[in-house]
Image (cartoon, rainbow, N blue to C red):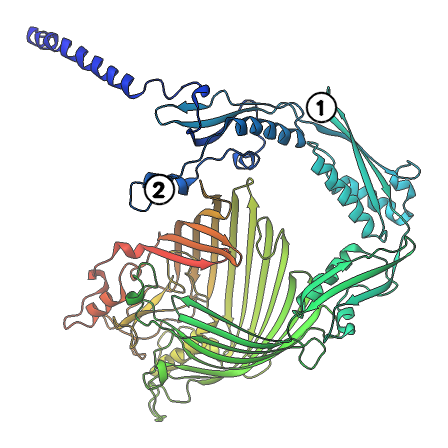
Amino acid sequence: MPPSSQTILGSRRPLLLLLVSLLAGLVAVARPAGAQAPLRYADVNTSVHDISFRFVDQQTFAPDRLREQIGTTGPGTLTRLRNRFAFLPGLQARRLSFDPVVLQKDVVRLRQFYQQNGFPSPEIDYPASQLDSSRNRIHVIFTIREGPSLQIRDAEFLAASSRTPLEATLPGDLQADWARYRRTEMGISGRYTDFKRTQIEDQVQGWLRNRGFAFAQVQSSASVDTTQYAADLRFLIDKGPPTTVSEIQVEGNESVDRSIILRELPFSLGDRFSADEVTEGQQKLFDLNLFRVALADVPSQPRDSTTTVRYRVRERKLRSYSGEVGYDTRSGVTLDGSWRHRNFYGNGRTFLVNLIAETGYPENVPDFLPSFLARSSSQELSRRFRASLTLRQPYILSKDLSGSLSPFVQERLNPTLAPDPTRPLDLNERKFGLESTLIYDFIPYRTVSLQHSLSRTQQFSGVETTDPERPGTLTGEDDLFNKSIFTLNGTFGAADDFLNPTEGYILRPTAKVGGLFLKSGVEFVQLNAELSGYLPVSSSVELASRVFVGSTWPFGESLDNLRRPSNPSAADRRENFIFQNRFSDNLFYAGGGSDVRGWSSRLAGGKVLRESSILREGFAYRPIGARSKVGLNLEARFPFPGLGSSWRTAAFLDGAYVTSGSLDLTPPASAPSILSGPDGAAVSTDPSQVLVGTGAGVRFETSFGFLRIDLAYKLTPDALDLRAAEDVGAAVTAENPLPLSEVDTRSLQRFRLHFGIGRSF
């Protein structure tokens, strides 16, 4: 090192030492041993800053469950946030007081909790707790050594009177059934708890009650070997006599005839008693929608070979009104009202009058909500006004088979058609018809349904002529046709809850046939299936997935007019466009909060630019639709840190492949309202695309389902996804039209905020 450098460093060394000394002094003054002050310095003004747990050997229970056992409470996320902004007017810091006596009791509570859950000698203390004397707040840290757990070593099931094994007292046809049930379903192993012993009691009693022993009673005891950390269980069983149903009592019915109640029960007089069948009968009565309350029990009676079963019901009002108001980004404000008679001319029939108004208002959504929060201004809105009458018969030859008839009339603004400015509210489609349905419930929530929809549809193209010599134009009769569609649906699977599943799988296959038996303007076969799976990874983390596969095969006139001829004539293009309009409701679409997130509903995939007489911007995208679709959704659901169990977070990845195959589904540039580019072709994107979106969201559980907010990001946008319809429309209709490639993109178009109610899938 040069001498000059040594001189400079040497002259600065005392100054550096002085600065280090000053900093050390400042740190010592700022933190005068407050962070690790002894706990005896806590006083009545000490507050709880946080509560945490440290596990020495192993961890069996989540911290949230342990916090539920103690009386000391710490601030949550919202309290911390409130305290941080307590300097604002009107906000006051919330202080959670620390009580040493409560802390001592918490140690006892935690010790008892562990002992009740199979840990006989847990060690629990709080020596690592930290008292910050400068702020007079404490971080309570429980140190837990669970120790070895009690394991179930053996279990014996004995007849209460003779102390002989239970299987020896069972009828011959039940002995093998009992041995199989005990071996495969009871799960007599693992950690011993009082709850598990009681659970096995209930299982044994339920098994007997479902096989005719209505008065079975079970008592249990446990012998604990603390040196071996083992527990031996003994169950004493008084199964009572085998019984048959001798009487069915019905109480509380007034307008509903007793015979209607009895026919819904899955058993009759003289049948062997089954507790599961008694409960199933209760569920069947609820499904009738005639009763507010339906209770099933076995009243007190002598323990002999007969059983009396009792059902107590309380009827709903025979006539009722209901109404709902909602908002949808495609349909605007939606009104739904109905009048219902629950026992129409007796026999449990339901008569329903239903009115639906999807108003489409507010039309210019950006004036109502920012476009980022509402529907994209590039999406055409829809309107629908529908009136229907429904007559439902709950019993057709069997209690498991029900049916309904529903005539309806509907006026709609179909977003895949050009609006008709000559009609009220630009409505462009009228439909009336009859829907008939048969539903077979073979197991609760496992159903098969067959529906037939017969309708007469009139589509108003806005371009009409009666000149048959002009094959390239539309006539008033071109858009008038019948629809006859049969639909077969099924719901199968094994899930813990079919309405709100968290574990298992649900399969929903669907088959549709149009024009098979009756003359129809649409002729096709369509098959699709949706498989959803749910897997709990831990007590608080859940994985969910969904796979969708579907394809459509037109035939007859539909196939002739939708496939792509090599050199289409004007008449070919005319017929193709007519059948595109007819077929639009029977194609597959992608996008929306429960499909491929990141895109507006139905706008993921191929689309075409058109003029809009409704939107302020004057332009919109029309979805083309697809012949086939394959979709995959993956979602991981987590707790929301610092908030209660009602709050959840989610991360997701959605994908789909849509294709038109050999069908020509892109409207020609000559079609009404369709816009063309400088090359004369319609401004559109490929109807065959791979779509991928990802993002994260928040869920809040309410009594009517989850409220969902998801922020999604398009990973595979097409040329129109990143360009607003008004920008593209202005460019192609300018005096000097620009090609699509020269229209500016908007980065914000990659994002989409989705709102919803219920689970994503």
Which residue is found at the position 48% from the left and 79% from the top?
386
Q: Nearer the viewer, mark 2 or mark 1?
A: 2
Q: Is residue 701 above or below residue 106?
A: below
**Would residue 678 be visible to someone looking at this image?**
no
Which residue lies under the disc numbered 1? 229
Number of numbered labels in the structure image: 2
Which residue lies under the disc numbered 2? 92
Q: Is residue 491 above or below residue 464?
A: above
**Would residue 752 be visible to someone looking at this image?**
yes
Q: Position of residue 83 (x, y in %)?
A: 36, 39
Q: Is residue 756 above or below residue 410?
A: above
Quadrant of the frame with the N terminus: top left
**Amino acid residing under circle 1:** Tyr
User: For numbered disc 2, what is the local secondary structure?
Assistant: loop
Mark 1 crowd level (few <14, some 14–19, many ≥20, 10 Å Cα): some
Is residue 428 rendered to the left or right of residue 291? left
Which residue is found at the position 71% from the left and 35% from the top?
194
User: For numbered disc 1, what is the local secondary structure?
Assistant: loop
Q: CA distance from mark 2 to mark 1?
A: 52 Å
Is residue 548 rendered to the left or right of residue 617? right
Q: Earlier in the sequence, mark 2 or mark 1?
A: 2
